[in-house]
Image (tube, rainbow, N blue to C red):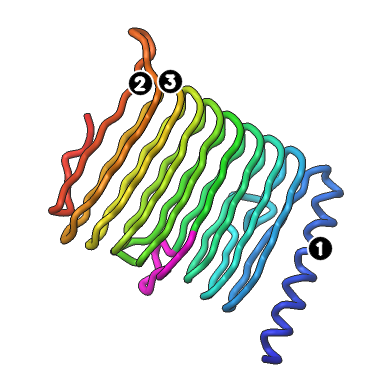
Amino acid sequence: MEKKNKMNAKQKLTFVMMFLIGSAYADNEIYIDQVGDEAIIEIVQDGSGNKVGGSTSDDTKFLLDGDSMDFNVNVSGGSNNLIGSIIGTSTVDIDVSGSSNDLFLDVDKDNAYGATNGDFVINLTGSSNELDLDVGSLDTANDLDFDMIVDGDFNTADINIDASSLTFNMDMAGDNNNLLYNGSGYDGHEFVLTGLGSYWDIEINQESTLQTDSLEIEYDGSGTSTTDATICITQSDSGDSTGCE
């Protein structure tokens, strides 16, 4: 218990230091290297050009390593960056409001034990935002619950999840949005996509090995002869699919 209290005190001190450094350069910048269980971290940033990462000088990802973590981020403004790596069972809630924001996250991408029972909620509101999310490898993400909302135009989401079981619900609203989703693993995946808008480009690949995948899509919108609205779906129970052309 004494060791945990020292870790939390150091963590708070680190955040204070980084906020002061950020204010000196007009933009807010937070750098995280957290190892330990049951951490509760809340971050609120307001404005443009903000960053949550792992280094002052490059695109090194922040690190959260531990079980039973609670990570909440609320970012408002444009041209913000959230670059991070999470290892262990976590509850993650990310809310981003604004345009031209970049989110690059991986969860237990190379960890042998996996993020069992992870619960993730991501809300993106605004235009021209980019999300790149990688969760698990070799079925290291077990019993994952993932909810995502994208509201705005010209947003791009590239999501790769290697899970032994997965429930994924996604709502998209806006025009010219792009989604690439790859789901793989041994147990079944459930993916529900609801959308409203035109000129979308959607590719979905589900490749469970032993169980049945389920997919439900309800999308209201259209394309034109010059600007398509396309959906490509590939499902395979052998763990290997041909993909979309």
Q: CA distance from mark 3 to mark 2?
A: 6 Å
| Residue plotted at (35% across, 43% down) | 181
The answer to which of marks 3 and 2 sits earlier in the sequence is: 3
The amino acid marked with disc number 3 is Ser
Along the line of sight, the residue nearer the viewer: 144 or 181: 144
Q: Which residues are magenta?
A: 108-119
Give yes or no for contact between labels 3 and 2 (Cβ–Cβ under 8 Å). yes
Q: Does residue 163 sit above or below 173 in this rendering? A: below
Q: Is residue 77 left or right of residue 159?
A: right
Secondary structure of residue under mark 1: helix
Give yes or no for contact between labels 2 and 1 (Cβ–Cβ under 8 Å). no
The amino acid marked with disc number 1 is Met
* Mark 1 crowdedness (10 Å alpha carbons): few <14, some 14-19, many ≥20: few
The answer to which of marks 2 and 1 sits earlier in the sequence is: 1
Residue behind mark 2: 229
Secondary structure of residue under mark 3: loop
* Quarter of image, res 217: top left
Q: CA distance from mark 2 to mark 1?
A: 48 Å
Residue behind mark 1: 17
Q: Does residue 82 sit above or below 112 in this rendering? A: above
Examine the structure image and report whether residue 103 is included in the region drawn in magenta.
no
Residue behind mark 3: 198
* Mark 2 crowdedness (10 Å alpha carbons): few <14, some 14-19, many ≥20: some
* Quarter of image, res 49: top right
The answer to which of marks 3 and 1 sits earlier in the sequence is: 1
The amino acid marked with disc number 2 is Ala
Secondary structure of residue under mark 2: loop
| Residue 60 visible in the picture | no
Query: Marks 2 and 1: which is nearer the front?
Result: 2
Q: Does residue 151 sit above or below 42 in this rendering? A: above
